[in-house]
Image (spheres, helix red, strand yellow):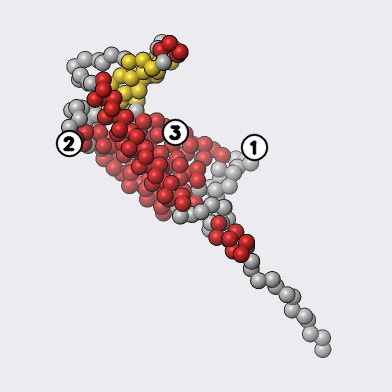
Amino acid sequence: MFQRKAKNVDPPTDSTNATNRREGPDGRSGRGPLRPIVFVAIAVLGITADLWTKAWAFRTYGFDPDEYSKIHWWGQQAFGEVFGIQTSVNHGALFGLGQGGVNVFCVLAIIAVVGVTAWYFIGRPKREWWLTVALGSILGGIAGNLFDRLGMPALFGMPETGRGVRDWIVVMLGSYHWPNFNIADSMLVCGAIMLILHALFTSPDGKKKEVGSG
């Protein structure tokens, strides 16, 4: 009887172990624990930047609820009247939609904060850098404006805004005055665009879609 010789199997090397550690459950590379930290950091830094710039703009340029404040232009000599600062308060949603629904927007914002956070940590997003940045931006934007809608600025000695969202950035598109916005709005829009691009160019299993595929 002939005995079949067993094949020699090389023991795993340090480089192989390192590769396995770098790959996530779906095979994509990246350090898992780092992404949640970045997610939280983006949200916290976004909230901080939003609240600090709002406080600076309203303290520096003031706010009169009975009078539309003057526009203070940035780089007027270089760009003309395109970018500026004008303090205003929005009692609606993004870009002034749905005026007067502060309580409704508060409830929706709280639900969104819980939902985005749960989706990130429980679902697939925590395994992807693109979704980490997108959802971190959205969370920071929602929380920054929620701070205003809950009436928190008045507790810190800031001008009373009637639980409206403080806006201060002005952009003129030709003769059209784009609705005033803030850092939180910018984060929301950027995060939403990133989610749309992810949905368009990434398949449900997380792989890039091929051109022409449905």
Whether residue 136 is situated above or below residue 5 in the rendered picture: above
What whole-number distance in Å separates the C-alpha atoms at marks 2 and 3? 30 Å
| Among the 4 quarters of the image, the one containing residue 3 | bottom right
Local packing at callout 1 (Cα closer than 10 Å; few below 14, some 14-19, many 20+) is: few
Asked whether residue 3 appears in the rendered view, the answer is yes
Asked whether residue 99 appears in the rendered view, the answer is no
Residue at image point 45% right, 13% down: 79
- Where residue 11 sits in the image (x, y, percent)? 65, 71
Precedes in sequence: disc 1 or disc 2: 2
Towards the viewer: 174 or 208: 174
Residue at image point 33% right, 19% down: 85
Kindly identify which residue carries mark 1: 212
Kindly identify which residue carries mark 2: 155
Residue at image point 39% right, 30% down: 186
Precedes in sequence: disc 2 or disc 3: 2
| Among the 4 quarters of the image, the one containing residue 161 | top left
Whether residue 62 is situated above or below residue 112 in the rendered picture: above
Whether tag 1 and tag 2 are in contact, CB under 8 A, the answer is no
Kindly identify which residue carries mark 3: 190
